[in-house]
Amino acid sequence: MINFEKQQSIAFVTLSRKDKQNALNFVMFKQLTTIIKQIKKDASIRAVIIQGEGEHFCAGLDITAVMKNPINIVKLLFKWLPGNCNLAQQVVLGWQSLSVPVFAVIQGNCFGGGLQIALGADYRIVHPDAKLAIMEARWGLCPDMGANVILPSLIKRDDAMWLASHAEPISADKALQLGLITQVSDDPKQHCLAMIDTLLARSPDTLAAIKRVTQQSFNSPRRQILAKETISQIRLLVNSNTKKAIARAKGADNIEYQNSKRW
């Protein structure tokens, strides 16, 4: 479901569930963390491209597939300490831990967890017809895959709140305007390869140092954010309004939410 291929010094990581718009199931989370570790150990890799098979990048979490075995939700959210990365957060922030530049090639739908994975890349090159969305709010949930660590370095606070709250897709041009993506291109993969050609002329140690220094200069209180993401999500999962939000997302519109204690 995740294809990994190395061509010369470039690693290609392909989300491969074309019939499901490459939606994420539990196995894909495990595979992605394994691939990130594999790339980290391979000194011959100079750049990474994350892409989706077919017409779409990723439609987000395949909720039906994951919920077939509820223990998988526990495995996705479990962490030994609140500030540590859980499995869901590792597939986003893991790309940030690599010393090489990471590119996301985005076409078609890039929703929910798919967009959060793309945010973990250093560069996002997007087809003009692509649609991007943070969609967790539709299901009564909050973004909880670590993207909140990255977003403050990309977009304004009110834009981040609105994207996560209204949960509707935006165009590639709008995403570029907000600073959510790097560039819009009619051929995003070739655009990435051209950028990589430029970077391959630079010392890999230089690129690694630039990546670390840049990350530090845009540093957010990572452990506190990761803890808040997971705690908030767990509370939402057991909240009665979440069940109503799921029903609404499935098409039952006449639902009244109840006020409850805020956090």
Image (cartoon, rainbow, N blue to C red):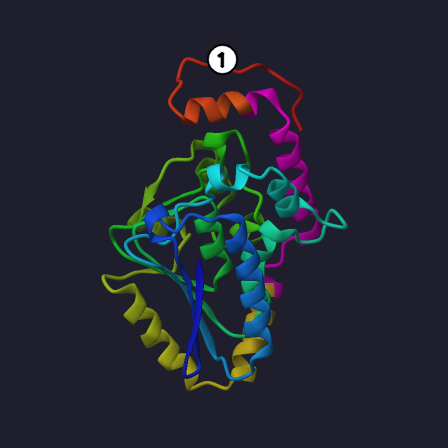
Task: Give, as a single range, the part of the protein colored magenta.
Answer: 216-242
Q: Is residue 257 visible?
A: yes
Q: Is residue 184 above or below residue 9?
A: above
Using residue 214 as the reference point, say whether residue 254 is left or right of it.
left
Front residue of this view, candidates 147 and 78: 78
Q: Residue at x 51, y 20 (%)?
A: 244
Q: Residue at the location (48% across, 72% down)?
A: 101
Q: Which residue occupies 66% across, 31% down?
A: 235
- Count the labels in the image: 1
Residue 25, given in percent of the width and then of the height, sits at: 49, 48
Compared to residue 5, the image places residue 25 above or below, namely above
| Residue 41 drawn at (x, y percent) | 60, 77
In what element is the residue under mark 1?
A: loop
Name the chief secondary structure element in magenta: helix
Q: Which residue is mark 1?
A: 256
In this image, 43 relative to 232: left or right?
left
Q: Three-letter amino acid code at disc 1? A: Glu
**Observer able to see residue 153:** no
Residue drawn at (49%, 13%) of the image:
256
As for residue 225 lying within the magenta part, the answer is yes
Q: Nearer the viewer, residue 10 or 210?
A: 10
Residue 73: say if magenta.
no
- Placement of the C terminus among the 4 image quadrants: top right
Residue 59: percent from left, percent from top: 39, 46
Tell me if mark 1 has few (under 14), some (14-19) or many (20+) residues whose alpha carbon lies within 10 angstroms of its own. Answer: few
